[in-house]
Image (cartoon, rainbow, N blue to C red):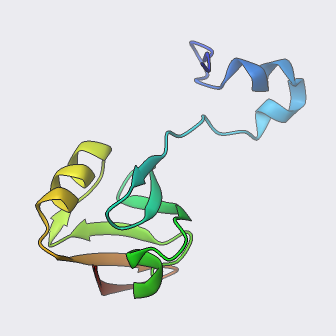
């Protein structure tokens, strides 16, 4: 279990390291999406792709590390609840609206 400092929101372990804590961000919880085969975290608008399950549908469809999934089937996904709800509602194929660098595009991900 990770404990956090009340004012800074930083994990206490980072505060014990002294100067290293100045550049550290609060720890972000990751969500494992077994259906699409990716790990995502939420830092504002969209779901940031932080990992893949080898051979996953998302990897085969061209989703990349650090892509931001802004919408699933036209619905915004700004938090874990929205993400899980809309991925769960998607049919056999999920249409992901992705932001990569300064560009946005759609990717169809399915089994």
Q: In the shown orientation, is residue 46 left or right of residue 49? A: left
Where in the figure is residue 64, as x and y percent of width and height?
52, 77
Instruction: Give the vertical position of 44 relative to 23 (above or below).
Output: below
Q: In the shown orientation, is residue 46 left or right of residue 89? A: right
Instruction: Give the vertical position of 71 relative to 3 (above or below).
Output: below
Where in the figure is residue 104, as x and y percent of width and height?
37, 84
The quarter of the displayed image where residue 62 is located: bottom left
Q: Is residue 39 visible?
A: yes
Residue at screen point 47% across, 79% down: 59
Q: Is residue 62 visible?
A: no
The quarter of the rendered structure image containing the N terminus is top right
The quarter of the displayed image where residue 87 is located: bottom left
**Total numbered labels placed on residues in the image:** 0
Q: Nearer the viewer, residue 26 or 82?
A: 82
Q: In the shown orientation, is residue 7 left or right of residue 58? A: right
The quarter of the rendered structure image containing the C terminus is bottom left
Residue at screen point 48% across, 57% down: 39
Instruction: Give the vertical position of 95 relative to 34 (above or below).
Output: below
Q: Nearer the viewer, residue 95 or 44?
A: 95
Instruction: Give the vertical position of 81 relative to 100 (above or below).
Output: above
Residue at screen point 17% across, 51% down: 85
Where in the figure is residue 89, as x and y percent of width and height?
11, 60
Residue at screen point 53% across, 40% down: 28
Where in the figure is residue 38, as x and y percent of width and height?
45, 63
């Amino acid at each position: 279990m990770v404990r956090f400092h009340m004012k800074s929101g930083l994990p206490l372990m980072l505060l014990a390291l002294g100067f290293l804590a100045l550049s550290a961000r609060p720890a972000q919880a990751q969500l494992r999406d077994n259906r699409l085969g990716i790990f995502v975290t939420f830092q504002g608008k969209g779901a940031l792709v932080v990992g893949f399950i080898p051979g996953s549908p998302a990897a085969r469809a061209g989703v990349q590390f650090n892509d931001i999934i802004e919408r699933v089937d036209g619905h915004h996904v700004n938090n874990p609840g929205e993400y899980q709800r809309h991925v769960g509602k998607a049919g056999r194929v999920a249409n992901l609206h992705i932001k990569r660098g300064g560009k946005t595009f759609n990717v169809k991900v399915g089994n």
